[in-house]
């Protein structure tokens, strides 16, 4: 069955530090999709990025970047020059095309950025 | 257009009562998903629809839980004979079409069973 592991339960950094959130997944499908979501203290779930299994190109969006490596089944998320507003719980998620039709979310990593 | 909306936002009910939670997806989105999220945990999949067809209900905890989307738009998640363990945040999400697309989440319904 598909599975998502986020080994870091909580991370605290000081503003302007870089931080990487780890995501490791398991799937038997060859076509699958990976996602990151942010859940700030207000509670909503905000979509950040989607990646399909055939696109290993890393992506950068402002201070955010994502590193997808199929060889290690990882899809890590880096925030550069962190800000207090980045404080949130971040979830990695996986969906499969052929073997499963539903999203599996990881347990989340709580990031606290201290001023 | 508007995002995903859910109602009510908060529901307090007594054990044994039935509750119905409503989700209005983003207009034009084919797929609709229901999740349950306990405090401090990630969303847990319950069920999902493409149009009006329920594609997967493997996440529904037991037969007290059911969902429908009769016209392929608004969906209702119903919990019969509620129990205290049903207390959680229930979230709805919609996506353009299927699992390859990102999901956009509603604000959730906080259900408390007393």
Image (cartoon, coloured by chain):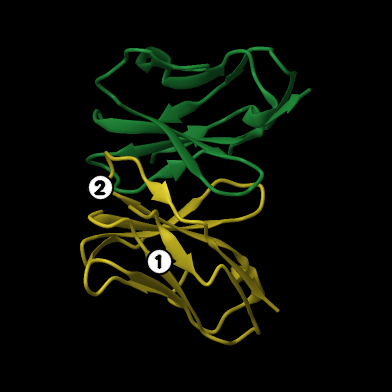
Chain colours: A green, B yellow
User: Viewed as shown, does residue B34 lie left or right of A87?
Assistant: left
> In this rendering, does residue B61 appear at all?
no
Q: Which numbered circle lies on residue B99? A: none
Work out which residue is located at the far front of the displayed protein and give it.
B1
User: Viewed as shown, does residue B40 lie left or right of B64?
Assistant: right
Q: Residues within 10 Å of mark 1 (few under 14, many from 20)?
A: many
Q: Nearer the viewer, residue B69 or B74?
A: B74
Q: Nearer the viewer, residue A103 or B90?
A: B90
**Residue at the spot 46% in from the left edge and 71% down from the top edge:** B62
Q: Which residue is mark 2?
A: B96
Disc count in the image? Answer: 2
Chain to which mark 1 belongs: B
Q: Which numbered circle lies on residue B23? A: 1
Where's the N terminus of chain A, which quadrant? top left
Q: Nearer the viewer, residue B53 or B91?
A: B91
The location of residue B36, given as percent across then percent down, is: 52, 58
The location of residue B110, given as percent across then percent down, is: 60, 65
């Amino acid at each position: 069955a598909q599975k998502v592991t986020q080994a870091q339960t909580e991370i605290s950094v000081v503003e302007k530090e870089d931080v990487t959130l780890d995501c490791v997944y398991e799937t038997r499908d060859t076509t699958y999709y990976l996602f990151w979501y942010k859940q700030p203290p207000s509670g909503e779930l905000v979509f950040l990025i989607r990646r399909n299994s055939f696109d290993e190109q890393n992506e950068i969006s402002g201070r955010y970047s994502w590193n997808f490596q199929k060889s290690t089944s990882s899809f890590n998320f880096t925030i550069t020059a962190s800000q207090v507003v980045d404080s949130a719980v971040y979830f990695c998620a996986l969906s499969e095309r052929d073997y499963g039709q539903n999203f599996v979310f990881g347990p989340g990593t709580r990031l606290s950025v201290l001023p | 257009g508007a995002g995903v909306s859910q109602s009510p936002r908060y529901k307090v009910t007594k054990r044994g009562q039935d509750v119905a939670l409503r989700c209005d997806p983003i207009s034009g989105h084919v797929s609709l998903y229901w999740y349950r999220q306990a405090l401090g945990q990630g969303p847990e999949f319950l069920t999902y629809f493409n149009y009006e067809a329920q594609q997967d209900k493997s996440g529904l905890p037991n037969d007290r839980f059911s969902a429908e989307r009769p016209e392929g738009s608004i969906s209702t998640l119903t919990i019969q004979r509620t129990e205290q363990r049903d207390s959680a945040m229930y979230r709805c999400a919609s996506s353009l079409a299927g699992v390859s697309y990102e999901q956009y989440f509603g604000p959730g319904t906080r259900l408390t069973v007393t």
